Image: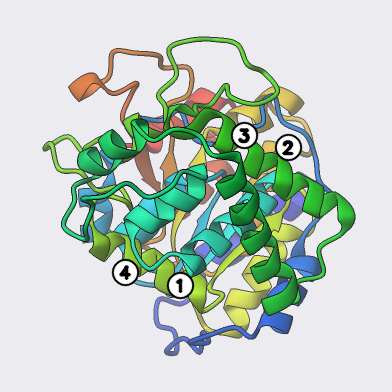
């Protein structure tokens, strides 16, 4: 196993710096989009929570640096809506979201429908939480003004039922995605949780329903970087439209896949290489932590398989990992849980190859 990992890492680190202009599509047809999801995905796995949204209030801290150091290409990520904020900032040409939970893929399909059905942020929030749009909101409304208005709107079951049907109609009738009955039930479940908790939804909402101190949707969407600037995809209409544009062109592709698995990440690498595209950024959250915990240091699988998978991706010196400082708790700068950090993907792979990464904490020696 380690010999194959070392070979893969050696090949990627020796890759030439000059590449042809990418041939990524301006739009992916519906049938091709679904085939890409279906062919590239792995069987769904489990995680410790349903994870409808992030708990990383420090996720925007790295955005100013990322905007300077990365270049437009492919964005890879994991988890739900925090990806949209990175996408709005980095403006990638294509996006792949890979998560071990099939429910996350279904949540992203629900989001896709919401973006397509909503011309602006106020309409988007109306559909996301199944709340009727209050008067007085406009394209110039701040994120704080939007959420203040929606927090005062009462629940409406009739509106929610109509909203859910329009989401399903767009996915099943307009796009003709081949969702199973279980997939439909999964979308209904995700929609129902957002309806039930509204803007107060947090990381523990859903099946767990316990634990305090988690940031809610409002906290995350009104958070700032270390300079106090709001950068969420709902901070302004320009950010929102950048994400919506990719969604309407089927260029945000959600996959079900294990980072240490044998299919999903490698399929993404094959697709990007076929189009001469480079990975600009790869948001990991704290998935590495679970890969190391599950397999232990110096064991086959888990983290070693993950880095071998990453080595098959098309990279250059600007390709960047985005990591969460897991287990941080309160106490980060600016009231954040802890700011996220970044690291060169190629430097990380070199450290793996040289034996400098053996434990989870080792990855942060390369992060800033």
The residue mark sitting in front, 2 or 1, is: 1
User: What is the secondary structure assignment of the residue under circle 3?
Assistant: helix
The residue mark sitting in front, 3 or 2, is: 3
The tag earlier along the polypeptide, 3 or 4, is 4
Measuring from the top left, give residue 170's x and y in whole percent: 64, 70
Q: In the figure, is residue 274 to the left or right of 320?
A: right
The tag earlier along the polypeptide, 4 or 2, is 4
**Residues under numbered marks 1 and 4 in contact, where contact means CB atoms less than 8 Å apart:** no
Label 3 sits on residue: 193
Label disc, if present, on residue 71 of the rendered structure:
4
Residue drawn at 42 percent across, 55 percent down: 124
Task: Decide: is 246 above or below 145.
Answer: below
Task: Decide: is 347 above or below 221.
Answer: below
Label disc, if present, on residue 246 of the rendered structure:
1
Residue drawn at 33 percent across, 68 percent down: 241
**Residues under numbered marks 1 and 3 in contact, where contact means CB atoms less than 8 Å apart:** no
Decide which of 314, 173 is in the foreground and name it.
173
Residue 310 visible to an observer of this rendering = no
The residue mark sitting in front, 1 or 3, is: 3
User: What is the secondary structure assignment of the residue under circle 2?
Assistant: loop
**Callout 3 crowding tier (Cα within 10 Å): few <14, some 14–19, many ≥20:** some
Q: CA distance from mark 1 to mark 4?
A: 17 Å
Label 2 sits on residue: 302
The tag earlier along the polypeptide, 1 or 3, is 3
Q: CA distance from mark 3 to mark 4?
A: 36 Å
Q: CA distance from mark 4 to mark 2?
A: 29 Å
**Callout 1 crowding tier (Cα within 10 Å): few <14, some 14–19, many ≥20:** many
Q: CA distance from mark 2 to mark 1?
A: 32 Å
């Amino acid at each position: 196993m380690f010999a194959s990992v070392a070979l893969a890492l050696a090949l990627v680190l020796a890759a030439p710096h000059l590449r042809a202009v990418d041939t990524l599509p301006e739009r992916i047809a519906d049938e091709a989009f679904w085939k890409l999801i279906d062919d590239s995905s792995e069987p769904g796995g489990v995680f410790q929570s349903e994870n409808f949204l992030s708990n990383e209030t420090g996720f925007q801290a790295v955005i100013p640096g990322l905007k300077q150091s990365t270049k437009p290409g492919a964005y890879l990520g994991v988890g739900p809506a925090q990806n949209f904020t990175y996408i709005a900032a980095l403006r990638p040409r294509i996006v792949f979201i890979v998560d071990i939970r099939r429910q996350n893929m279904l949540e992203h399909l629900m989001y896709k429908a919401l973006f397509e059905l909503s011309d602006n942020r106020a309409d988007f929030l109306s559909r996301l939480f199944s709340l009727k749009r209050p008067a007085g909101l406009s394209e110039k409304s701040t994120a704080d003004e939007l959420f203040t208005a929606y927090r005062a709107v009462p629940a409406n079951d009739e509106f929610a039922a109509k909203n859910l049907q329009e989401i399903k109609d767009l996915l099943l009738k307009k796009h003709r995605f081949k969702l199973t009955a279980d997939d439909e039930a999964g979308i209904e479940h995700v929609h129902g949780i957002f309806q039930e908790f509204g803007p107060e939804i947090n990381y523990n909402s859903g099946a767990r329903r316990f634990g305090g101190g988690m940031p809610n949707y409002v906290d995350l969407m009104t958070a700032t970087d270390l300079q106090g600037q709001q950068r969420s995809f709902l901070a302004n209409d320009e950010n929102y439209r950048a994400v919506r544009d990719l969604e309407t062109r089927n260029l945000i592709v959600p996959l079900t896949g294990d980072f240490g698995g044998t299919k999903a990440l490698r399929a993404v690498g094959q697709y990007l290489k076929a189009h001469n595209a480079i990975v600009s950024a790869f948001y990991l959250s704290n998935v590495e932590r679970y890969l190391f915990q599950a397999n232990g240091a110096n064991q086959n699988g888990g983290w070693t398989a993950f880095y071998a998978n990453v080595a098959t991706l098309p990279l250059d010196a600007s390709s960047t990992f985005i990591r969460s400082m897991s287990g941080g708790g309160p106490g980060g700068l600016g009231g954040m849980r802890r700011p996220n950090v970044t690291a060169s993907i190629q430097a990380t792979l070199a450290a793996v190859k040289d034996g400098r990464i053996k434990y989870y904490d080792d990855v942060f020696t390369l992060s800033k």
